[in-house]
Image: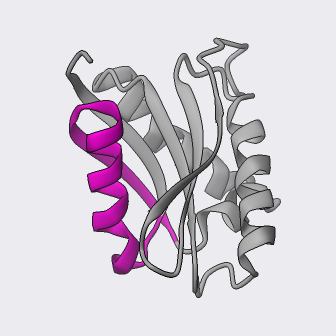
Amino acid sequence: MEQREFVTVINCMDGRVQEPVIQWMKSQYNAKYVDSVTEAGPNKVLLGNDPQKIDSIIERVRVSTDKHGSTVLAIAGHYDCAGHAVDGELKKARIRESVELISTWGLDVEIIGIYVNDKWEVEEVCGRARQPQAKAQ
């Protein structure tokens, strides 16, 4: 597998999930660095109706894709999230919805959804191949 310089994750700000996600992304994609865009309950933020917050996330993701050359973007959710306190199955459904939303942003990246379980292990929930689309407004 080729070495990637950067991959990207939209992750929760919760410090418990940072290392497991970073290590998993590095291992899974043979990446040197993981750019992190953090929010409290990122799936809730993405699926909410606050265009300023969503635009802020898009802007930070674009730094990673446009300036660092990242070709993989993960959206994470996790067990025991204070920012989006829902059960695991609903969280996984929201992760899938977030992947679908992100796929409309016009990024030329592979998009995946990941969930960090109660053992702090990363599970891949879903994925979407690179499909460049019209740029987000």
Looking at the rendered image, the quarter that the N terminus falls into is top left
> Would you say residue 7 sits in the magenta stretch?
no
Residue 3 visible in this rendered orientation of the protein: yes
Using the image, determine if residue 87 lies above or below residue 66. Answer: below
Q: Relative to 54, is 15 on the left or the right?
A: left
Along the line of sight, the residue nearer the viewer: 31 or 122:
122
Along the line of sight, the residue nearer the viewer: 13 or 89:
89
Using the image, determine if residue 104 lies above or below residue 33. Answer: above
Residue at x 58% of width, y 33% of height: 111
Image mark count? 0
Looking at the rendered image, the quarter that the C terminus falls into is top right
Across and down, in percent, residue 20 comes to 33, 64
Q: What span is colored magenta in the figure?
A: 12-39
Along the line of sight, the residue nearer the viewer: 38 or 92:
92
Residue at x 42% of width, y 23% of height: 71
Q: Tell me the colour scheme of the image.
A: one colour
Res 43 quadrant in image: bottom right
Using the image, determine if residue 116 lies above or below residue 111. Answer: below
Residue at x 37% of width, y 33% of height: 63
Across and down, in percent, residue 28 comes to 35, 38
Residue 50 visible in this rendered orientation of the protein: no
> Would you say residue 23 sits in the magenta stretch?
yes
Residue at x 75% of width, y 28% of height: 104
Res 136 quadrant in image: top right
Across and down, in percent, residue 99 comes to 69, 41
Using the image, determine if residue 31 lies above or below residue 24. Answer: above
Across and down, in percent, residue 126 comes to 67, 42
